[in-house]
Image: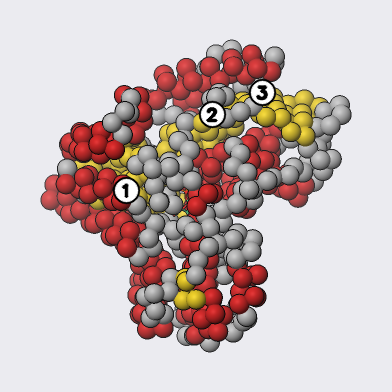
């Protein structure tokens, strides 16, 4: 999956046929609004999509594999650049100016920019992409850093806080735009993902790397298998041909899940709990002096996993061995992390042989958390169990093409069953669901979905459902009548239409050259 971000002059390379009309209108409007706003035409558009995660929830920051796919909804940044004869300035506006106010800010001489992670400001995502891209430009000794004025007009269709990773789409599109603004027409996908992962952490969330990988690497029509250990890797997975085509339906809960606001008690707390579970397990198993890894706090359950079996002399990374290793780890957790009620800071410090002060300094300072106890047992159980489900899902996707309707049905039921198991674990063990998401899943299953679960960070946001094509309308109707109309009686038709998306796997990040083009 290595290679450069594609550069195109045709929307046909980006969107499926049935989306082209709407996209042409949207892009034309963006480009003409750009001209109106800045008095000059845009030179290029940087584009990155949102994603839906099919399976592998909350395990990317523990460095286990995940299977997401890009959606058609995306972030577009139309851009023009000119030499700064004075202080370099970025002007950034959004087509939804009532929601996202126009801003302008200056850059330091080395291209640097301050980010106030405490303020929930939409342009922070641009700034974090800019900061990451600037580092990469410096690494490549590119000239002209901090010597440009950049004008940007943004148009995003990935709902913010809707679980489809609008933030990663924005950061990836921003970093790509800044690279291209500095004359970089070939941008390495892997470098872009790596910088976007680190950049997004500057906005205050200790994120894993799944969203950025899905946004950049995806290819139309396929899902992605993304790995993080020993290094970031991604490969496309074709969906099997089944009698009734595999259809994934995405439904919004409309419970706003603002990761940044809730981070100290939700997302960032889970990252801390997983890291501490890994530290405690390593210590109990006598593993010492382990090197840092690429996870947000420098040590992951995956590194514990690998070191544990390395010490036991396990060789090879055969999938069958890997699955049996994960099963063994579940037993280890069961035996050695028995406390259902959680562990206090003092107990954890004692287990890993450090002081409470040190523990807080090392794991809870960069991204503060609020908790008296840490549920190490439950979090580790979810992570190892979910890693097994990803392997099983992958096996099913790669199984031989079903030769009859019954085999097809079995395959779809198998995939759906895994999605349902993930939901159960997210709800009861990882505690990242919410009653509304549970309700959407229950309704979908009763109306014929094979499998239903939350997707993304959870605590609101989005859900994903594997539905037989013939049942899509019935599932939609059940949600409309028993969920949306009940919880949001005033919802208008347009919002209701946005609530449910039958998603085809979309293409990843792209640079679109506007210059010289008369029409789209
Ligand atoms: P969302 O909130 O849906 O973008 C977040 C993380 C992912 C992953 C999922 C849970 C960010 C940018 N993304 O996704 O890396 O950990 O939660 O699987 O924080």
Query: CB at mark 2 closer than 8 A to ligand 1?
Result: no
According to the image, label 2 marks what residue?
99
Q: Sequence order check: which comes first, mark 1 or mark 3?
A: 3
Residue 43: which numbered mark, if any? 3
- Point out the frontmost of discs 2 and 3: 2
Residue drawn at the location 53% of the way across and 42% of the way down: 167
Q: CA distance from mark 2 to mark 3?
A: 25 Å
Query: What percent of the width, then of the height, locates residue 407?
Result: 16, 52
299 above or below 144? below
Asked if one can make out residue 218 in the rendered structure from this viewpoint, the answer is no
Find out if the beta carbon at label 3 lies less than 8 Å from the nearest ligand 1 atom: no
**Looking at the image, is mark 2 or mark 1 earlier in the sequence?**
2
Task: Say whether residue 126 is left or right of residue 334.
Answer: right
Which residue is nearer to you in this view: 343 or 78? 343
Callout 3: SS: loop
Which callout, 1 or 3, points to the residue nearer the camera?
1
Which residue is tagged 1?
Answer: 437
Seen at 40% across and 29% down, the residue is: 16
Image coordinates of residue 475 in percent, x first then y, are 21, 39
- Judge left or right: residue 345 versus residue 159: right
Residue visible at 82% across and 43% down in the picture:
110
Q: CA distance from mark 1 to mark 3?
A: 42 Å
Q: Nearer the viewer, residue 52 or 498?
A: 498
């Amino acid at each position: 999956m290595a290679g450069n971000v594609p550069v195109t002059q045709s929307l046909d390379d980006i969107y499926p046929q049935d989306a082209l009309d709407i996209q042409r209108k949207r892009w034309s409007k963006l480009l003409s609004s750009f001209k109106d706003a800045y008095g000059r035409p845009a030179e290029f558009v940087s584009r990155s999509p949102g994603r839906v995660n099919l399976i592998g929830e909350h395990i990317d920051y523990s460095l286990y594999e995940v299977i997401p796919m890009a959606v058609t909804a995306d972030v577009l940044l139309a851009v023009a650049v000119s030499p700064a004869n004075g202080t370099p300035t970025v002007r950034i506006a959004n087509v939804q100016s009532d929601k996202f106010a126009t801003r302008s800010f200056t850059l330091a001489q080395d291209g640097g920019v301050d980010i106030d992670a405490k303020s929930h400001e939409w342009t922070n995502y641009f700034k974090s992409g800019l900061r990451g891209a600037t580092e990469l430009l410096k690494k490549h000794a590119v000239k002209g850093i901090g010597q440009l004025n950049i004008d940007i007009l943004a148009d995003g269709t990935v709902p913010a806080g809707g679980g489809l990773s609008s933030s990663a789409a924005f950061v990836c599109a921003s970093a790509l735009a800044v690279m291209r603004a500095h004359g970089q027409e070939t941008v390495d996908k892997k470098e872009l993902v790596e910088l976007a992962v680190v950049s997004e952490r500057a906005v205050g969330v200790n994120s894993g790397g799944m969203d950025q990988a899905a946004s950049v690497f995806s290819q139309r029509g396929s899902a992605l298998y993304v790995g993080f250990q020993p290094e970031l890797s991604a490969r496309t997975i074709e969906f099997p041909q089944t009698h009734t085509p595999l259809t994934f339906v995405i439904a919004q809960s409309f419970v706003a899940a603002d990761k940044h606001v809730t981070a100290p008690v939700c997302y960032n707390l889970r990252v801390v709990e997983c890291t501490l579970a890994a530290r405690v397990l390593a210590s109990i198993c006598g593993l010492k002096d382990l090197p840092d890894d690429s996870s947000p706090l420098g040590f992951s359950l995956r590194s514990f996993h690998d070191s544990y079996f390395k010490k036991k002399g396990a060789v090879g990374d055969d999938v069958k061995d890997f699955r049996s290793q994960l099963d063994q780890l579940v037993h280890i957790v069961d035996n050695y992390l028995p406390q259902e009620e959680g562990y206090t800071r003092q107990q954890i410090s004692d287990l890993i042989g450090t002081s409470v002060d040190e523990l807080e300094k090392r794991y809870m300072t960069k991204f503060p958390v609020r908790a008296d106890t840490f549920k190490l047992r439950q979090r580790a159980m979810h992570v190892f169990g979910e890693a097994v489900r990803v392997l099983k899902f992958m096996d099913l996707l790669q199984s031989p093409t079903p030769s009859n309707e019954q085999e097809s049905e079995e395959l779809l039921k198998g995939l759906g069953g895994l999605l349902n198991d993930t939901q159960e674990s997210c709800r009861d063990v990882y505690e990242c669901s919410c009653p509304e998401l549970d309700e959407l899943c229950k309704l979908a299953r009763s109306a014929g979905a094979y499998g239903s679960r939350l997707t993304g960070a959870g605590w609101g946001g989005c859900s994903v459902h594997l539905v037989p094509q013939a049942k899509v309308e019935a599932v939609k109707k059940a949600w409309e009548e028993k969920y949306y109309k009940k919880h949001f009686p005033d919802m208008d038709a347009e919002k209701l239409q946005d609530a449910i998306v039958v998603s085809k796997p979309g293409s990843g990040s792209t640079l679109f050259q506007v210059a010289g083009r008369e029409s789209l």
